[in-house]
Image (tube, rainbow, N blue to C red):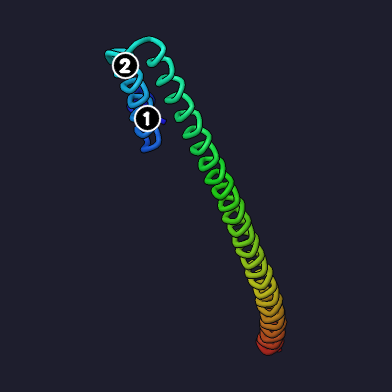
Amino acid sequence: MNKAEEQYPVQTGSTFAKGIFIGGLLGAAAALLFAPKPGRELRGDLSEKVGMVTDRTKEVACVVGDKASELAKTVSSKTSDIAKTVNQGRNDVMDSVRRASSDIANETSKASNEVAVAAEEAKDDARKELNSTSL
């Protein structure tokens, strides 16, 4: 992470939504506190609003928990798929390397035999030339 990213982190949509939710709660509490109502009625209203906020918070927590669970399952599934793909790719590469290594060994062996035969023929030709020039 570079300096700019550390100094100015990107705000996500959920952070913005939390800010709106908290701001709404503070605004509602301020409106109730400055409303021209008697204390008993104001406390009753506050108690009712706190109950509503508590219920809504529980609902949001359940939804967030469900979404987190779904996300965890998705991530787990995708990770498993990626691991299988990587493993298959590794196996394919290893098979290709084995085949190429075998092909190279065969070609090297053939070339070595051809060089040995050519060297033997050259040796025989050289002997014949020496014998013919010596006589």
Kindly identify the amino acid type of the residue bearing the numbered disc 2: Ala
Q: First in sequence: mark 2 or mark 1?
A: 1
Residue at 71% across / 79% down in the picture? 113
The quadrant holding residue 112 is: bottom right
Kindly identify the amino acid type of the residue bearing the numbered disc 1: Phe
Q: What residue did someone put label 1 on?
A: 21
Instruction: Tell me the quadrant of the picture where the C terminus can be found.
Output: bottom right
The answer to whether 123 appears left or right of 49 in the picture is right
User: In the rendering, at what x and y percent does residue 89 appear?
Assistant: 60, 64
Can you say whether 20 is above or below 106 in the image?
A: above
The answer to whether 11 appears left or right of 48 in the picture is left
Q: Which mark is residue 128?
A: none
Q: Can the viewer see residue 95 in this picture?
A: yes
Instruction: Tell me the quadrant of the picture where the N terminus can be found.
Output: top left
In terms of depth relative to the viewer, which is nearer, 129 or 115? 115
Q: What is the spatial separation of the Cα atoms under label 2 and label 1, in whole angstroms?
A: 14 Å
Residue at 31% across / 21% down in the picture? 27
In terms of depth relative to the viewer, which is nearer, 58 or 116? 58
User: In the rendering, at what x and y percent does residue 36 appear?
Assistant: 27, 13
Can you say whether 52 is above or below 45 in the image?
A: below
In terms of depth relative to the viewer, which is nearer, 58 or 70? 58
User: In the rendering, at what x and y percent does residue 111 appear?
Assistant: 66, 77
The answer to whether 53 appears left or right of 108 in the picture is left
In what element is the residue under mark 2?
A: helix
Residue at 67% across / 86% down in the picture? 125
Q: Which residue reaches farthest top?
A: 39
User: In the rendering, at what x and y percent does residue 60 appear?
Assistant: 49, 38
Q: Nearer the viewer, mark 2 or mark 1?
A: 2
In what element is the residue under mark 1?
A: helix
Can you say whether 83 is above or below 5 in the image?
A: below
Q: What residue did someone put label 2 on?
A: 30
Q: Badge 1: how crowded within 10 Å, few (<14), some, or many (20+)?
A: few
